[in-house]
Amino acid sequence: MKGNTNSPRFVFPRWLNLLRPAIAVGGAGGAVYLAVLVTLGFSPKTVSVGYQPEQPVPYSHRLHVGELGMDCRYCHNTVERTARAAIPPTQTCMNCHSRVRTNSDKLTPVFESFATGKPVQWIRVHDLPDYVYFNHSIHVNRGVGCVSCHGRIDTMEEVRQEEALSMGWCLECHRAPEKHLRPPEMVTDMNWKPEKEQIELGRRLREERNINPPTDCITCHR
């Protein structure tokens, strides 16, 4: 039976057949482009490195650590004992600022926090996903310097994330910790340099302290 001859017919010119290869290549290229865009666009290296949120108080690490020489552990006083580096309570700030710059407008949130008992809403810069377990005390007590993960904090007016903190980045250190090991008493010294070549020192410290970081999944994903 013949079809309905009254139905509209759409006839394309034959030369359009020549465009088929171009359309196929363009579609495949678009798919590859989209995959690369998503992979790179959402990778930790892309979305995290350089992260520098505006804090409620313009606290300068360059001033406090770099110029005044404050030790990291004065404010982050749990790094040697617990998994997390504590965000300092307002009382820690007031130990100095009850006498220093007591009329500074920049410190208004600190003074209000001290008066009301409500904490300053600091924004954590180095914030790992919930499915990642990281223990500060293990790394600090083994001799991994703050600078290895956080960069030269003592030169930063505002703290930013320097490293990717990705799984691959962590594994590089776990597989070759000698590149980062230093005497534990020097972990917070941003200017520390090994007297000998770093790899030589790191290998000696690794052997003396029996440092063999695990690389199995359960180490970080618990």
Image (cartoon, helix red, strand yellow):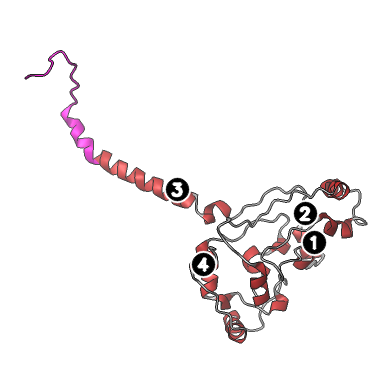
Looking at the figure, which quarter contains the C terminus? bottom right
Pointer 3 residue: 38
Rendered residue at 66%/51% (across/down): 52
Q: Nearer the viewer, residue 154 or 54?
A: 54
Disc 3 versus disc 1: distance between alpha carbons? Answer: 40 Å
Disc 2 versus disc 3: distance between alpha carbons? Answer: 35 Å
Pointer 2 residue: 59
What's the residue type where badge 2 is placed? Tyr
Disc 3 versus disc 4: distance between alpha carbons? Answer: 27 Å
Q: Give the image location of residue 139, x and y in percent.
A: 64, 72
SS label for mark 2:
loop
Pointer 1 residue: 64
Mark found first going from the N terminus, 4 or 2: 2
SS label for mark 3:
helix
Residue furthest to the top in view is: 6
175 lies left or right of 36: right
Inspect the magenta stretch and tell me whether residue 12 lies in it. Answer: yes
Q: Give the image location of residue 91, x and y in percent.
A: 85, 57
Q: Main secondary structure of the magenta part?
A: loop
Do residues under tags 2 and 1 come within 8 Å of each other at their CB atoms?
Answer: yes
Q: Nearer the viewer, residue 63 or 10?
A: 10
The mark closer to the camera, 1 or 4, is 4
Mark found first going from the N terminus, 2 or 1: 2
Do residues under tags 3 and 1 come within 8 Å of each other at their CB atoms?
Answer: no
* Residues in magenta, as a range: 1-21
Mark found first going from the N terminus, 3 or 4: 3
- Specify the label residue 218 is tagged with: 4
Rendered residue at 63%/68% (across/down): 148
Q: Residues within 10 Å of mark 3 (few under 14, many from 20)?
A: few
What's the residue type where badge 3 is placed? Val
